[in-house]
Image (spheres, grey):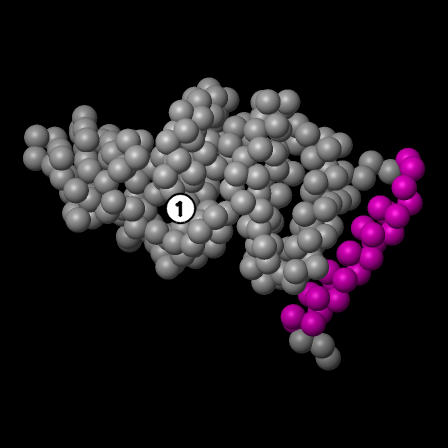
């Protein structure tokens, strides 16, 4: 009898064959959802870990998603998956190259996801020394906030600042292990980069701001980190940086 992993692998292979056959029919087929389903199946076969996918699987996924973006530019799922995929290429494109493409999508579609990643990519450039990118990041963030103002997940950080470089500096929350309710943070922080900053303002136990060296501010919760108004302002701290629809979020804030 085959093992469970072999059985699942066989199921994925059968599913891929079905989707591939449908896609090969060409005319009369609404291809976009089929392409996306192929990407999901390839990813599921590797336990939903882009890092475990083979280079040819990554490249195929990127090609399918780029075809989808051309055909259905307003479907945010395509951009979200594409951004996740390209960072796992053997030679990922530069952040500047990706900014150009995402800026084009954002200007043509004005979707939340395009604006979200545009602000994140500009923030990466700003954090790494580009003064020009700061204003662009702020403009994209303002648009992102406007489009997400009624969403319940607007303060959730789907992407995080990692300890690598280029696009690989972005870490999706799926790669941080499970949520530790005791620590109130992710279990695996090894991919993340600890940033330095200074507490600039505290308006109460539930709201404060930390200023990064580039002059950008990140929201944090002083009551969780043990900081308070009148005592902790101007205090140097370190933290993990998350990118939410509503802006930068500082987590696991410690005195420097």
Q: Residue at x 16, y 42 (%)?
A: 236
> Badge 1 local density, few (<14 within 10 Å), some, or many (20+)?
many
Identify the secondary structure beneath mark 1: strand
- Among the 4 quarters of the image, the one containing residue 159: top left
- Among the 4 quarters of the image, the one containing residue 1: bottom right
List x then y, in percent, for residue 227: 15, 39
List x then y, in percent, for residue 250: 30, 40
Position of 185 with respect to 34 (left or right) is left
Residue bearing the label numbered 1: 161
81, 108: nearer the viewer: 108
Residue 146, relative to residue 157: is it above or below?
A: above
Q: Residue at x 38, y 42 (%)?
A: 128
Q: Residue at x 82, y 57 (%)?
A: 17
Position of 43 with respect to 99 (left or right) is right
Q: Main secondary structure of the magenta part?
A: helix
Residue 120 can be seen in this image: no
List x then y, in percent, for residue 202: 18, 29
Q: Residue furthest bottom?
A: 1
Q: Find the magenta span and give its range.
A: 4-28
Position of 55 with respect to 216 (left or right) is right
Residue 240 can be seen in this image: yes
120, 41: nearer the viewer: 120
């Amino acid at each position: 009898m085959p093992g469970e992993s072999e059985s699942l692998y066989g199921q994925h292979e059968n599913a891929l064959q079905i989707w591939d056959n449908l896609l090969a029919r060409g005319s009369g087929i609404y291809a976009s959802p089929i392409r996306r389903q192929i990407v999901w199946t390839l990813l599921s076969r590797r336990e939903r870990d882009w890092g475990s996918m083979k280079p040819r699987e990554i490249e195929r996924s990127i090609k399918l998603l780029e075809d989808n973006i051309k055909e259905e530019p307003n479907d945010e799922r395509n951009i979200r998956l594409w951004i996740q995929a390209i960072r796992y290429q053997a030679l990922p494109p530069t952040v500047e190259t990706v900014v150009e493409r995402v800026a084009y999508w954002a200007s043509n579609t004005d979707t939340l996801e395009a604006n979200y990643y545009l602000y994140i990519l500009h923030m990466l450039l700003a954090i790494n020394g580009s003064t020009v990118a700061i204003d662009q990041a702020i403009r994209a963030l303002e648009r992102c906030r406007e489009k997400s103002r009624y969403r319940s997940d607007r303060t959730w950080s789907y992407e995080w600042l990692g300890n690598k470089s280029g696009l690989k500096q972005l870490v999706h929350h799926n790669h941080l292990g499970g949520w530790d309710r005791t620590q109130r943070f992710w279990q695996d922080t090894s991919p993340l980069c600890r940033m330095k900053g200074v507490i600039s303002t505290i308006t109460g136990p539930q709201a404060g701001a930390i200023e990064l060296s580039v002059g950008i501010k990140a929201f944090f919760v002083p009551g969780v980190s043990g900081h308070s108004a009148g005592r902790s302002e101007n205090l140097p701290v370190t933290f993990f940086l998350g990118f939410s629809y509503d802006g930068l979020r500082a987590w696991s804030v410690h005195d420097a």
